[in-house]
Image (spheres, coloured by chain):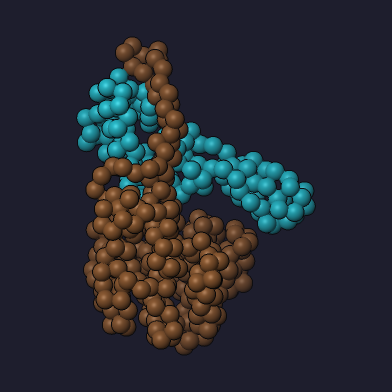
Chain colours: A cyan, B brown
Amino acid sequence: MHEISLVQGLVQQLKELAAANQATKIISVTMEIGPLCGVVVDSFRFGFDIISSEEELIRGAELKVNIPTVRYTCSACGNVLVTAGERPDSCPSCQEQAIFPEGGDDLILLQVEME
Amino acid sequence: MCDTCGCPSPSDNSHDHDHDHGHTHSHQSGHSHSKTVDVHASLFAANDALAKANREHFNEVGAVALNLISSPGSGKTTLLEQTIDALKGEIKIGVIEGDIETERDALRIRAKGVPVIQLTTGGACHLDAAMTHKGFHRLQKEPGGQDIDLLFIENVGNLVCPSTFDLGEHERVVLVSIPEGPDKPAKYPKAFTSSHTFLVTKTDLLPYFDFPVPEAVGDALHLNPKLRTMCLSSKTGEGMEIWLNYLRELVANKKAGKLK
C-alpha cells in the first residue's frame, strides 16, 4: 500500500523535471525496482495508473520497469550467487547459511521521455 | 535548516531539500520533438535525507530513538506501558505514537506520565521521516519534551510498509506475538532484514498456541544473522529484564558517545 505514496513522490519529481526541460507531456518513465526494496511491482503500476490518470502531464504515459538481479555472497567461502531476488537456503559449495545480499534494494527513476 | 527551530532537518514548507536529484542528461530520441532525460535518482532519497537530518537532531539533543514495527495487536503499546513503569525513575522517556486514526494510544501513554504525541496518518500505512520530524517538534513542546534520553516511535501496525522507510531511528525493533504464528519472519523478510532487534511477545500464551520459538528465531537469524533476539511477556514480566537492560545499555552507550 505504501507504493501509492512512493508514486506520489515520483509524480512530484516528474513535474519538476518537465518544468526544468520545458516539456508539457511525459511519454514514458523507466524505473528500476529492486526485488528487495519492499515495493510490489504490480502495486506500483496500479498506483501509477491511478495517479497518472488524474495528472494531465502524465496521463497515458508508459511505465517501463527494469528488475535488477541480487548478488548473494557466502560469509564463509565468498561464493557468489546471482538470483532474481530469492535468498538461497544455503551456500551450494559449503552449506553455510549466513549469506548476505548486495544490490536490488533500491527504487530508482532511471529515465524519462518527454515532449 | 528547519524553520521551526533551526534543527538539521530541511524546512517543512519550502523545497530546499539537499538530496541529490541525480545526474540528469538529456538527448533527443527517435520520437519527434521528444527528448529523453537520464535521471538515475532513488525515490527513497528524499525520505533518506530527512531521516538523516532526524538522526542528527536526535543526536544533538542526546536521545536514542527506537522505531517499533509489528502487525496490529502484537503488543507494542502494552510493552511501552510496562517499560515506562519499570524505567520511569531512571530514564527520561518520550513517545511518538503512529496510528491511522484515534488518539487512543497517546492517551494510554500520557496516563503513564511521560511526554507523548499522536501522529494520525489518516489512512497511510506507515510513518515516514517527514511525519517523524514534525512529530518530534510537537513532542519537544510537551511538558518534559525538551529532555528525552530514550525516544520510542511506535509505527503504524503493519509488518510490511513501515520497513521501507527510515525514520532516523538508531535502532529498529520488530515484534511478533505468539498468536500470530512462527512463520512471520519467513513471510515478511524485510521487517527482519532491516531490524536490529527481534522481540517475541506474549510468551504467556505459549501453552495455548503452536508457536515453536526456535523455528521463528531461526528463520529470523537466517535472514539477518546480526539480529538480537528476545522473548518476553508484558503481562507476566517474564523476559522483561533482558529488554530493559538492552534499553539501559543503549542509553548508556548514547551518553558515552558510542551510538551515532
Question: How far across and how far down the image is residue B39, in percent?
Answer: 42, 30
Q: Residue at x 58, y 47 (%)?
A: A86
Q: Is residue B72 left or right of residue B192?
A: left
Q: Nearer the viewer, residue B110 or B181?
A: B110
Res. B41 image quadrant = top left
Q: Is residue B142 left or right of residue B40?
A: left
Question: How far across and how far down the image is residue B89, in percent?
Answer: 41, 86
Q: Nearer the viewer, residue A64 or B242?
A: B242
Rendered view: A87 above or below A31: below
Q: Residue at x 40, y 21 (%)?
A: B26
- What is the count of numbered marks? 0
Rendered view: B163 above or below A104: below
Q: Residue at x 46, y 73 (%)?
A: B177
Res. A80 image quadrant = top right
Q: Nearer the viewer, residue B58 or B22?
A: B58
Rendered view: B12 above or below A104: below
Question: How far across and how far down the image is residue B23, in percent?
Answer: 44, 30
Rendered view: A50 above or below A18: below
Q: Residue at x 71, y 53 (%)?
A: A75
Q: Say if residue B161 shows up in the picture.
A: no
Question: How far across and how far down the image is residue B120, in percent?
Answer: 26, 62
Q: Say if residue A55 shows up in the picture.
A: yes
